[in-house]
Image (cartoon, coloured by chain):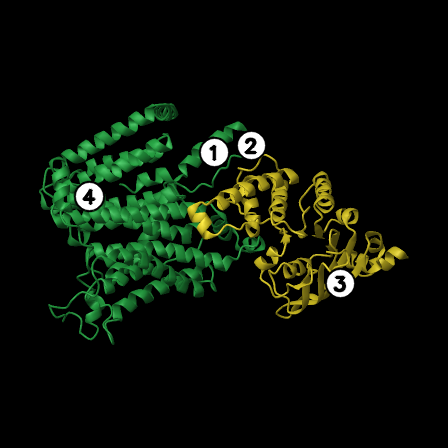
Amino acid sequence: MTDNEPFLVTEGVVKRFGGLIAVNKMDFTIDRGKIYSIIGPNGAGKTTFFNTISGIYRADEGSITFKGKHIGRMSADAITAHRIARTFQNIRLFSSMTVVENIMVGGYTRLRQSPLDILLRLKRFRDEERAAEIKAEELMEYVGVHGLGNELACNLPYGAQRRVEIARALAVEPELLLLDEPTAGMNPHESEDALILFRRLRDELGIAILLIEHDMRVVMKVSERITVMDYGEKIAEGEPKDIAANPKVIEAYLGRGAASGLSA
Amino acid sequence: MKNSMRESLARLANHLNTGRNPYVVSISLLVVGTALVYLSPRSILAFLVFAGATAMIYFLRMNKTAKLALAVFVAVVLVPILGARNIFYLEVIFQIAVFAALSLGLNIVVGFSGILNLGYVAFYAAGAYLWGFFGSQQAFLLHEIPGTAPLDTPFLLAPEWFYVFVLLGIIVAAFVGLLLGLPVLRVRGDYLAIVTLGFGEVVRQLVNNLDKPLNLTNGPQGITPIQKPTLPQGVVDAFNAVVGPLVGNRVTPSQFYNIVFYFIALIVVLAAIVVTHRLDDSKIGRAWTAIREDELAATAMGIPANKLKLAAFAVGASFAGGMGVIFAASRTFVSPDSFNFMQSIGVLTMVILGGIGSIPGVIIGAAVVIILNLQVLQSFSLYLTQLRQSDAVIPILNFAWKDLSTQLDPAKYQRLLFGLILVLMMIYRPAGLIPASRRIRELKGTPDASVSDGETNGDANGDAPEEADDDR
């Protein structure tokens, strides 16, 4: 595991829906233990690109490799087993389950209990369940929803649900975490807390994070590298300060002519 | 006024349910129920009191060992003795046990993993016809026209094979479940319901028509006789010698079979409860719930949804398969009529009425539906028919029951009333009689109050109390 081993690499990824090209020839890389962001106006294809990486959609063309393995043809659950976890833009918790059970679902791929262990309640099963419960509690504490373990997920306030969703993704023990608009609907104070959490995930757990964000301030503060998408294509890539000054980006966000207007 | 009454009622209930009181309540209820059934073995009211007393073992706040002891006492001592006095009760309880197992199986598919299955009875048919074929003379009648069996045809297997075939029925039905599961995985929602409905019909039509070219199922006439396991020498006499004085009448061998099948069905139900409960409280059960709630999110958490749906189909089907074998042996007869669409709907009704996804719920659901259909509504329509034959007059309207036209035959109200009960239940208790609840865990970060709550709830989900319910 050297630093220059390729981590996540996509080459020429294309995703079409009928005649619509949602993602067009995306080349993208992210390195181990970094925070990268994808931004772009509504309908730019960011979430589609996410879904293609995480296996919910299958790319029509191109290749996706993770740590040297081709994951482009794998199912979503197999990709998760390779330690890529994700959250959803519109929170998708299992609403009739408690918070702690939601998080334990995230640990599915990490549990080795066989049907025989389960039916006979063998030691391996009991030990694993206890460990999974403790792990879930630790994760709850880590993301800051301590003490809510037995609440039903659907009864939590919005911000707490976002945190639980991140805890559930962390239970996968991911090396790469895909967060789809994690601060949407949060007030500035809450999104500030979220940023602190993202940095801790990177620095303490060594997890690489790929963010989709609308909120430019959030993106600028936390990302080491930003990719800008528009109409399914990558239109710019670079460090936050370069992106902020890129006329193509300004045009995509504010409309044609805006960039020239600004520079004039 | 109404509120204060409700409050004092709640206080009374709470008082009866604390400390030593629940033990007193539970035992005295059982004594009263037993005495009533013992003294008037034909009274439905007496049976209902007894059934209620048994159910209360589950609901009252007692420790697990006490509940288990009471449940075992009811199941092993009281039911056989009371049942021997009125064999019809054993029939009712046997049917409750059969349908409790079916409901538990369907509950895994519909309740846990959220796949609507309208052809569930097909798995029950698979088990029944498995023993129906191998436990009868059918194997020697492959080239005969249905109904022309020579009198001296031998049986294919010895009756003791029955026990092996209970296990085989479980395995074969699980396999059939996988077969149905495969095409079902490609469709979702409403379409899926239609596919399973079609599957149920296909199986029924198959057994209906497989009397040619080879006479495998004897067609619409059904297969009979099917063997029962033989009773060991002297068992009936021993039973009569030991509990005969208590029962008050001699039990014939054919009546004794009711007791035997009651115990066999009870064992299968207990196994089904343990399997269901343990699967539910494991990574498999969590994965099923996750798939039901949000399949996309579940796969994103690394859950292989298709594999787990197939597992749900196989496990759910296996309960029905085992019970099918037992059903075939107890009736000594199987025919396609026993496995029609209404049976699938009936099991689904039990699951929904009792509490979808809830283990004690679906057992209570099976008990309530069976008792309603076999006893309460039956006697209700009997009562109306008696009125009709008497000189009674409907008050106020001044209308003689006798003059009621045949289209309004009271015997027909039975189904109407059942439907009405279902409608009212769904309006006032949509989550069922005992709604499903997620397991509450003892976590270090939670306040004390919720922890102690968690303990009682955890107990309620344990194995012991549920056993109480299917003794009924």
Quadrant of image for the C terminus of chain A: bottom right
Q: Is residue A240 visible?
A: yes
Q: Residues within 10 Å of mark 2 (few under 14, many from 20)?
A: some
Q: Amino acid at mark 1?
A: Gly
Q: Is residue B400 visible?
A: no
In the figure, what tint was chain B given? Answer: green
* Residue at the disc numbered 3: A234
Q: Amino acid at mark 3?
A: Lys
User: Where does label 1 land, which residue?
Assistant: B454
Q: Between label 3 and label 4, give the one nearer the viewer.
A: 4
**Co-location on one chain, circles 2 and 3:** no
Residue A43 placement (x, y as % from top left):
68, 59
Percent coordinates x, y for residue B15 in the rendering: 36, 23
**Label 1 crowding class (10 Å Cα cut-off): few <14, some 14-19, many 20+?**
some
Q: What is the secondary structure assignment of the residue under circle 4? A: helix
Which kind of residue does numbered mark 4 sit on?
Tyr
